[in-house]
Amino acid sequence: MPQKLELGTIDLTEPPGGVVLPVAGAPTAYNADPMDIRYPLAQRTAQIEPFHVMELTKRAAALEAAGRPVIHLNIGEPDFTAPEPVVAALERAARAGHTQYTTATGLAALREAIARDYGERYGLEMAPSRIVVTAGASAALSLACCALVDPGASVLMTDPGYPCNRHFVTAFDGVPQPVAVGPETRFQLTRALLESNWHAGTRGVLVASPANPTGTSIPFDELGRIVEAARARGGFTIVDEIYLGLSYENAPRSALAHGDDLIVTNSFSKYFHMTGWRLGWLVVPEALASAFEKLAQNLYICASTLAQHAAIACFDPASLAEYEARRNEFRRRRDYIVPALRNAGLPVPVTPDGAFYAWADCSAHSDDSWQFALELLESAFMFRWCRARTSATMTRCATCDCRTRTRWTGCRRPSPASGVTCRAANALEADAQRRAATRRP
């Protein structure tokens, strides 16, 4: 049960795992309690929820510490690590003392390597001056929102979608505008949905292809129509391509082919398997590069210098061959886990074509996917991340019932020997039996 906190004249309710602090405008009173903070938090903090997957991660770690054999099907992180050429480059850079600041936009050699990769991989001519190296894709999206979102401006995004996207907008006093999407559009935005949801206060659109948490992509031609519709309204388009390298059905094509006015984010976390290295990048219009550089100088100075030196080796032929082999392994895992989930009573309405996620429907077992995730973790010691609340205002989407959908990542090798399928199936069968036993005749 939530506990009440008495902070002087303030009566606040504490959620599990944290203390609610007063926000601006609330009266405060000092007492000797070390948890009593006299000054208020900014009001925007009340609009930003915890990153729930990290909360579940802590609980799974506690179960493992207690000796429980937790199977991780949860956080969006490859189980592969950086290949040997990248690790060797990191060591060389560290021993050579390359630890000083770089320019805010990143090492020239890394920006040139990224630009060259766009040409070799996607057939796009790219000026290195358009590349802004960042401290991960999260910093890239935060930087983009800082540059483009005015207070009160709305930004369209899908629901379900990556939950942090709305908080990137909120952090700069913008208004996230979720658009409910379902299996009929592969859980992706379309031009028709953009046009029907755009209003006078809308400033732009943020999409991801392939997307977290659904693993689905926007068809290339439809993405072009989305860009055209936003452009016609004087709005921006941000495309998150962090999973573009992990596309399985067709040769990937970058949204940058649709025009030089797009803002595109990418990262060394997913395809390059360097999540904890915190390194990503933006591609911005040439005319906006100096504005982005100015903001980056003030917000974080530069991304990790050592990580930047190491990342140049990501584009070595040996590294690229290793990444492609690993991409094929992710595809093999997808081809295993999606039918396994369906056979276990968790239908996947749309087969993912990229990334390493499966968006499953648990409505036959629970009407609250968050609680279902907790119960499955506690009873079967299977940890997967649910998306029970993808927007601050939604309880359940009438189109796709996405409150009862849950995401499974295929990052950890699934096999019959691991017990992934039978443990899930046993838990689901036990749940069905409990429900049948308590059902009134």
Image (tube, rainbow, N blue to C red):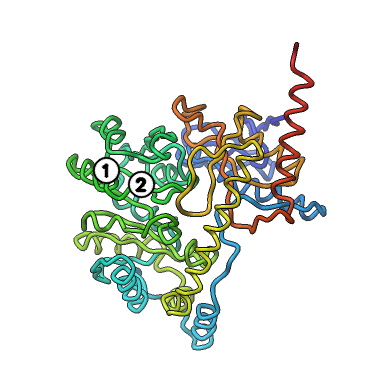
At which x and y percent is residue 258?
23, 54
- Quadrant assignment, res 279: bottom left
- Residue 223, image x, y percentages: 29, 47
Marks counted in the figure total: 2
Tag 2, which secondary structure?
loop
Q: Position of residue 387 (x, y in %)?
A: 55, 39
Identified by mark 1, the residue type is Ile
The amino acid type, in three-letter code, at marker 2 is Ile
Q: Residue furthest right?
A: 67
Q: Quadrant of residue 18?
A: top right
Q: Residues within 10 Å of mark 1 (few under 14, many from 20)?
A: many
Nearest to viewer (mark 1 / mark 2): 2
Which quadrant of the view contains residue 229? top left
Foreground pick, 55 / 398: 398
**Residue 225 x, y percent position in the rendering:** 24, 44
Q: Residue furthest bottom?
A: 96
Of 386 and 32, the residue lying toward us: 386
| Res 226 label | 1
Q: CA distance from mark 1 to mark 2?
A: 10 Å
Tag 2: Cα neighbours inside 10 Å, few (<14), some, or many (≥20)? many
Dot label at residue 372: none
> Compared to 277, does 86 lie above or below?
below
Picture residue at 74% right of the left edge, 38% below the top: 427
**Which residue is more in the foreground, 253 or 332?**
332
Residue carrying label 2 = 218
